[in-house]
């Protein structure tokens, strides 16, 4: 409806970007993290993603990275690295010996992103 009122030719990329940002702001508001458009622009989307990661909202952070088309290194890969570290730390605290279950969970999640390098990841168990 809003596109019909615009002068021709209209660059629709700006309209799409603003619509996506408004959807992100509405989703953040549902999480109890109310921000205005100006605040989001001032903070920058990567810093909001970092805040979501620190609060433990990894699935929402991944969705925002994909939705806002952030650079994968600074977006999804960074979120997944923090998620993996949190899963390993939680497993270490439990110390129940179910390494295979944790490994399967991590591999299942990371399989969706084939460009991720595993070179810098620490080993879960002492086996090489």
Image (cartoon, helix red, strand yellow):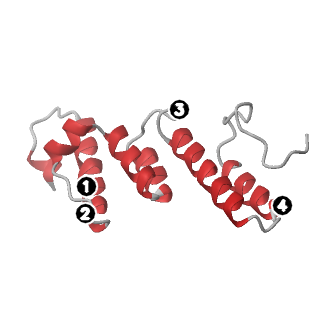
Q: Nearer the viewer, mark 2 or mark 4?
A: 4
The reply to whether callout 3 and callout 4 are in contact (CB within 8 Å) is: no
CA gap, disc 2 and disc 4: 37 Å
The reply to whether callout 1 and callout 2 are in contact (CB within 8 Å) is: yes
Q: Nearer the viewer, mark 3 or mark 4?
A: 4
Q: Is 108 or 98 nearer to us in this picture?
A: 98
Q: Secondary structure at mark 3?
A: loop
Q: Secondary structure at mark 1?
A: helix
Q: Secondary structure at mark 4?
A: helix
Label 3, on which residue? Answer: 73
Q: Toward which corner of the image does residue 41 lie, by quadrant?
A: top left
Q: Earlier in the sequence, mark 4 or mark 1?
A: 1
Q: Residue at x 46, y 46 (%)?
A: 66
The reply to whether callout 2 and callout 4 are in contact (CB within 8 Å) is: no
Label 4, on which residue? Answer: 100
Q: Which mark is residue 25?
A: 1
Label 2, on which residue? Answer: 29
Specify few, some or many for label 3: CA neighbours under 10 Å numbering under 14, 14-19, or 20 or more.
few
Q: Residue at x 68, y 54 (%)?
A: 88
């Amino acid at each position: 409806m809003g596109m019909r009122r615009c002068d021709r030719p209209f660059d629709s990329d700006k309209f799409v970007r603003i619509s996506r940002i408004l959807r992100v702001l509405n989703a953040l508001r549902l999480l109890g993290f109310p921000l205005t458009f100006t605040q989001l622009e001032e903070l920058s989307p990567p810093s909001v993603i970092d805040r979501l990661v620190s609060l433990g909202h990894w699935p929402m952070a991944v969705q925002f990275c994909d939705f806002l088309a952030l650079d994968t290194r600074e977006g999804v890969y960074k979120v997944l690295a923090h998620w993996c570290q949190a899963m390993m730390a939680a497993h270490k605290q439990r110390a129940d010996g179910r390494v295979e279950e944790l490994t399967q969970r991590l591999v299942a999640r990371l399989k969706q992103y084939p460009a991720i390098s595993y070179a810098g990841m620490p080993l879960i168990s002492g086996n090489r």
